[in-house]
Image (tube, helix red, strand yellow):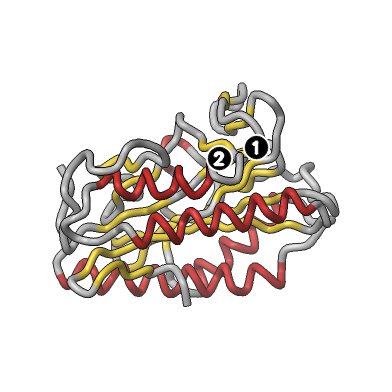
Amino acid sequence: MISIKNKYAQKNMIEAGRLLAEVFFDLQSYIKPGMTTFSIDLWIGRQLKNKNLMSAMRGYMGYKYVSCISINDEVVHGIPHEARYIQPDDLVKVDVCASWNGYCADMARCFYFGNDEHVKKLIDVAMSSLDHGIAKSISTNHLSDISAAIQLTVEQYGFGVVRDFAGHGIGKKMHEDPEILNYGAPGKGPLIQNGMAFALEPMITLGNYEVFVMDDGWTVKTVDKSFAAHVEDTVLITEHGPSVITRL
């Protein structure tokens, strides 16, 4: 069942989103090649604590960290590691979900340090597809209107849309109903209503969309080893349209 957030829930989610967006703003100038993904996770953990945000990831199904950090052909759910150093031409995806006063916001961004124009285009298209999905997040639209907008944006550039993982509802829990696919025909599924909250997260690839989960049980990689991009924002559906709470 898709929950409708009351004003109290929305207020707390908005604060969670604002504070989380501040963490990502500072992360832009902090993250650099030569760092380990473990050290970045530690830094994020300190920022969350300083802002009185509680990690929604640590403890989820036994996960030990406050972020997922995925590199190159890793799509999502990369595990921070003390021996994993960021290289100058790596495409790094950082995903963090945290709560304020019991209500969550979820956000992911790409960080790229190389000069490959294809990779830069991949990141740009991922953000564009997210924006197109957000634009369709309005009451009276169907849920799959979001999915179709994301897929159309991505595939017109010849990139792949991952099928095995999706966006989701969000609120008191990191993952709530509904599942929001990044592909599909428009005009399907439940009607979007004011008070719903979604975490939209396009996951796209330079090649084929097929992925697999590594033996660690978490990290998702592309089968053809192509680079992948992952971006995410949390959106509240309001009478005035979609409100992106994870952007400053």
Above/below status of 73 relative to 139: above
Disc 1 on helix, strand or loop? Answer: strand
The amino acid type found where label 2 is placed reads His
Q: Which mark is residue 77?
A: 2
Residue at left 36%, top 36%? Answer: 184
Q: Which image quarter: residue 157?
A: top right
Quarter of the image with the N terminus in it: top left
Give the vertical position of 174 relative to 25 (above or below).
Answer: above
Residue 10 placement: quadrant: bottom left
Q: Are marks 2 and 1 in contact (CB under 8 Å)?
A: yes
Relative image position of residue 155 (x, y in whole percent): 53, 41
From the top left corner, tell me how far across and down residue 36 is, in percent: 76, 51
Q: Residue at horizontal 21%, vertical 58%?
A: 196
Residue on which the image places disc 1: 74
Front residue of 24/51: it is 24
Choose mark 2 or mark 1, whichever is in front: 1
Q: Nearer the viewer, residue 116 or 87?
A: 116
In this view, the residue in front, 128 or 94, is: 128
Name the secondary structure under disc 2.
Answer: loop
For badge 1, the amino acid type reads Glu
Crowding around mark 2 (Cα neighbors within 10 Å: few <14, some 14 to 19, many 20+) is many
- Lateral position of residue 217 relative to residue 191, left or right: right
The residue furthest front is: 156
